[in-house]
Amino acid sequence: MIPTNSLVVSCQAAPGNPFFSPEAMALMARAAEAGGAAAIRANSPADIAAIRAVTGLPIIGLHKLGDPSGVFITPTFAAAAGVAEAGADLIALDATQRPRPDGTSLIDQIARIHTELGLPVLADVDTHEAGLAAREAGADLVATTLSGYTNSIPATAPDIDLVRSLATTLDCPVIAEGRFRTADDIRAARQAGAHAVVVGTAITNPMETTAWFAAAMKVV
């Protein structure tokens, strides 16, 4: 599982990013481990297998499939099985209260992951209600990953309020994830009760972080 008070580094790159390759993500994971990460979050069986070959850290595995406007983080049991076979230690999946693409329920997907794959499940949620429902459905950990991504109002900062509300309500670890960019963000999440914090773009996406600074240069 994920150690308490730990940093998880998300090693992911999308098409169009120069680092979009399993080899690059394996290098990112090695760098993250050398810097003190306690676990890695990774997308796709190919990336997970490459990362598994270079580190013994726990891997939170997922597979983004389908339309990003809907449930696309490990949307089916088959996607979870591929992630498990690649070497993931935990399976992350979309646990929002939106319809799943194959028509199955969240509780059924989690149950199959537990019984057939023998792995714990990290539920990526967007709201307090979704977090409660995910835990009721059997999720072993709950993360704030999807806060700000399932409605038309873009979020620009970490959802510390959601971290706090889940941490004070749930009887399982709550993982803070989503737009964590600074040490102050990390401290705020820990003070709100986060078991661990996931940082992705700010560490492993130099194309995006360069764009932040380039945009700042244009502001007078």
Image: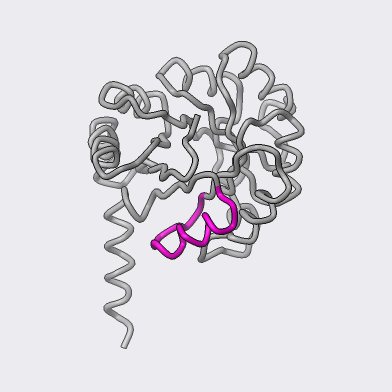
Residue 78 appears left or right of 28? right
Q: Residue at x 76, y 48 (%)?
A: 129
Residue 56's x, y, as percent?
Answer: 33, 24
Could you say which quadrant of the image residue 87 lies in?
A: top left
Residue 22 appears left or right of 120? left
Residue 162 appears left or right of 4? right
Q: Outermost residue, top direction? A: 116
Q: Residue at x 27, y 71 (%)?
A: 214
Q: Residue at x 29, y 41 (%)?
A: 32
Could you say which quadrant of the image residue 77 lies in?
A: top right
Residue 68's x, y, as percent?
Answer: 54, 44
In the rendered image, residue 19 lying in the magenta stretch gets the answer no
Where 183 sits versus 102, above or below?
Answer: below
Where 210 sits versus 122, above or below?
Answer: below
Q: Residue at x 35, y 25 (%)?
A: 46
In the rendered image, residue 181 lying in the magenta stretch gets the answer yes
Scheme of image coloration: one colour
Q: Tally the numbered discs.
A: 0
Query: In front: 216, or 4?
Result: 4
Residue 182's x, y, as percent?
Answer: 39, 62
Residue 135's x, y, as percent?
Answer: 71, 35
- Say which quadrant the C terminus sits in: bottom left
Which stretch appears magenta?
177-194
Residue 62 appears left or right of 18? right
